[in-house]
Image (cartoon, grey):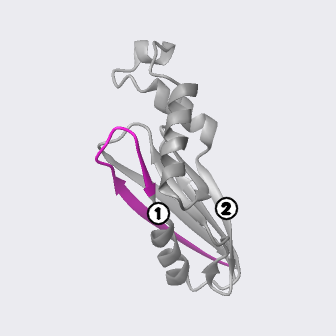
Amino acid sequence: MKSFRDLIIIKTEEQEEIVNITQKVREMCRKSGIKEGLIIVFSHHTSSAIYISDSDFRLTRDYQKILNRLVPNNDYEHDCVDHKKNAAGHLKSVLNGLQVIVPITSGELDLGAYQTIYYVEFDGKREKEILVKIIGE
């Protein structure tokens, strides 16, 4: 079994932002040379998330609206001890999850026709890392 590891570096322009990273993940999949296996896309930050959804960006905006309703910027205990006041970002991350796993078949991501891999940033305007780990043959 082979393994491959690389990083995607993201610097968002907004405090909260959703970025389509499918093409970058696809490129790493091809670069790895692994033909059959699994790819794990994992955020190294607890105020961000990785998810798979439809490619329609309007759905992405709807997703942001729902998250902001579920976790508004309120007074959270964490904000009393952390100068960044980013508790809402951490809580949104917990609701979403930090990683996705995608099958690799014949050297390509085995995604459905409209499935897209997104990185969502909840505490942005700085550089963040996304780990891409691939295992297989």
Is residue 3 at all visible to an observer of this figure? yes
The earlier-in-sequence mark between 2 and 1 is 1
Q: Residues within 10 Å of mark 2 (few under 14, many from 20)?
A: some
Q: CA distance from mark 2 to mark 1?
A: 14 Å
Q: Residues within 10 Å of mark 1 (few under 14, many from 20)?
A: some
Which residue occupies 70% across, 76% down?
37
Classify 100 as above or below 106.
above
Residue 101 at what x, y percent from top left?
Answer: 67, 61
Query: Is 77 or 115 nearer to us in this picture?
Result: 115
Identity of the amino acid at label 2?
A: Ile
Magenta range: 2-19
Q: Secondary structure at mark 2?
A: strand
- Residue tagged 1: 21
Q: Quadrant of residue 116?
A: bottom right
Query: Is 66 or 12 nearer to us in this picture?
Result: 66
Which residue occupies 53% across, 42% down?
62
Report the disc number at residue 109. none
Which residue occupies 34% across, 38% down?
15
Residue 109 at what x, y percent from top left?
Answer: 62, 75
Which residue occupies 51% across, 67% down?
22
Q: Secondary structure at mark 1?
A: loop
**Residue 10: within the magenta?**
yes
Identity of the amino acid at label 1?
A: Ile
Classify 33 as above or below 15.
below
- Residue tagged 2: 101
Classify 133 as above or below 10.
below
In the visual, does 54 lie left or right of 75?
Answer: right
